[in-house]
Amino acid sequence: MSVKPLEKKELEKYKKILQNEKGKTLNLITKISVKMKKGSKNSSGDLSSFSIHQADLGTDTSNLEKEVYLLEQEQIKLQKINRALKRIYDKTYGICQITGKYISKKRLKTVPWARYSIAAKEAEEKKKRRR
């Protein structure tokens, strides 16, 4: 099955999807950042807000690590979305950056910030597994 280039109307649709996803991602980044700041305890030096028991300290550390990981993942997603929006403006959106062929609409619908076709992505994954 041959994959066709995206029409202008379709590009606008993907642009809106990406902008909507960007808004959601920025909102989540803000929420996580605020939660992390509140969780970083009182910065005035008052130790009364710190956990006393070691189990509580472990839980606090584990929760902070999860939040940091989630924040990093959302920041990576935001970068991917921004790059996809740039490709729309550059008129290279929907073109695989490895093969130069068009990415299927099914893939773009699932992962609108996709840079690679499914075949190219699978080939990249195989290379990584061999290393």
Image (tube, grey):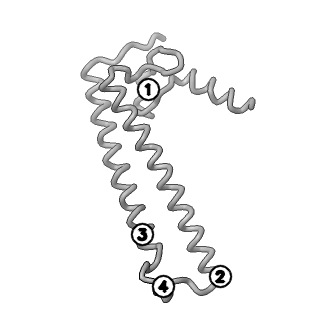
Task: Relative to 1, say whether 69 is above or below.
Answer: below
Q: Contact, CB < 8 Å: mark 1 with mark 3?
A: no
Secondary structure category for the residue under label 3 = helix
Residue type at mark 3: give it.
Lys
Q: Quadrant of residue 15?
A: top left
Q: For the C terminus, which image quadrant?
A: top right
Task: Relative to 108, say whether 48 is above or below.
Answer: below
Disc 4 target residue: 49
Gap in angstroms between the C-alphas marked 2 and 4: 14 Å
Q: Contact, CB < 8 Å: mark 1 with mark 2?
A: no
Crowding at dot 4, Cα within 10 Å, few <14 / some 14-19 / many 20+, comes out as few
Disc with the residue nearer the chain's start (1 vs 3): 3
Residue sticking out furthest to the top: 2
Disc with the residue nearer the chain's start (4 vs 1): 4
Residue 37 is labelled as: 3
Gap in angstroms between the C-alphas marked 1 and 3: 39 Å
Disc with the residue nearer the chain's start (2 vs 4): 4
Secondary structure category for the residue under label 2 = helix
Q: Contact, CB < 8 Å: mark 4 with mark 3?
A: no
Residue 106 is labelled as: 1
